[in-house]
Amino acid sequence: MISGRVVRPTVSEARRGLAVGAAGVGLTLLCGCAQEPRPSANPTPDAAAFAGAGAWAGDFAEAASGASSYERKILADGSISAAELSDSRQRMRSCMHDFGYRYTEHADGTTEAEPTARGSVTDVDDADADERMLECSRRFDRNVSLLYDDTRRNPEKQDEAEIAVVCLRRAGLVNGSYSERRWRSEYDAGAFSFDEWAPAAIHCRNDPLELVEQG
């Protein structure tokens, strides 16, 4: 750990195990995150209500059942725009700032929490930083980044193992004997036999079907 900083996977990456890019600048908030109520579990809506999400309609419905009122408004039409993503991430940064952290999203899919008061601490408390990230994500980005990235990188919700292995083979990171079964096993174990942070591997996680960059 770098002194005074805690670097963590994004909320999306932590839940899905895949690194996702992070970018966007939103509107300046007029209120702190403490004024936003905690999300509460609601009955899972009918997936048909999120028909605009296509193959991801069920995921939108499930996400909405445990989302904050802020997120439910974004998810309601079955799609997430770049502007909505940007606003969600800006609210995350503002929320973390209110808790005393400078929150930064990096292109490699990690996020960084650093105290805003210089010299106030020598090392960030890991547990506190993680707790604050979770608190803010529950309010503003529990599902927005995850579903935005998933619907763009795999709109038809194809099998992750299939598209990952094809991409990894194409990139030369694995050979023809590397199977989908092996990918699933390594994914579940959280340890891959190839360099998962090599640029080509990151690209395969972010854009396995070569759709995001084209868009």
Image: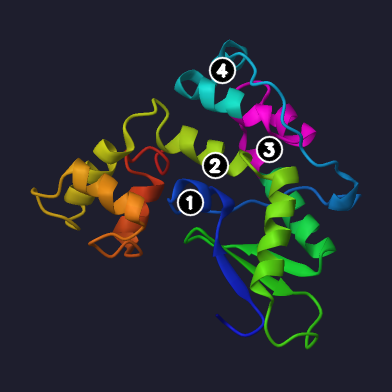
C-alpha span from label 1 to label 3: 17 Å
Q: Residue at x 33, y 51 (%)?
A: 187
Compared to 186, does 52 lie above or below? above
* Tag 3: amino acid: Glu
Q: Closer to the N terminus: mark 4 or mark 3?
A: 4
Distance from disc 4 to disc 1, alpha carbons, whole Å, reads 23 Å
The answer to whether the residues at label 2 and label 1 have Cβ atoms under 8 Å apart is yes
Q: Amino acid at mark 4?
A: Gly
Specify the amino acid type for callout 2: Leu
In depth, the one of 59 and 81 nearer the eye is 59
Q: CA distance from mark 4 to mark 2?
A: 17 Å
Residue 28 visible to the viewer: yes
Image: 69 above or below 135: above
Check disc 4 and report the residue beneath it. 52
Quarter of the image for residue 133 reads bottom right
Q: Where is residue 189 shown, x and y percent of the image?
A: 33, 55
In space, the residues marked 2 and 1 are separated at their CA atoms by 8 Å
Instruction: Pinpoint residue 1: horizontal percent, then vertical percent.
Output: 55, 80
**Highlighted magenta segment, given as a residue range:** 63-85
Decide which of tag 4 and tag 1 comes sooner along the chain.
Answer: 1
Residue at image position (77%, 35%) is 70
Q: Which mark is residue 20?
A: 1
Please tell me whether mark 3 sits on a helix, a strand or a loop: helix
Q: Which residue is mark 3?
A: 84
Label 2: how many Cα within 10 Å (few below 14, some 14–19, many 20+): many
Of the residues under marks 2 and 1, which one precedes in the sequence? 1
Which amino acid type is shown beneath numbered disc 1?
Val
Please give the residue where the numbered disc 2 appears in the rendered image. Answer: 146
Mark 1 touches mark 3? (CB < 8 Å): no
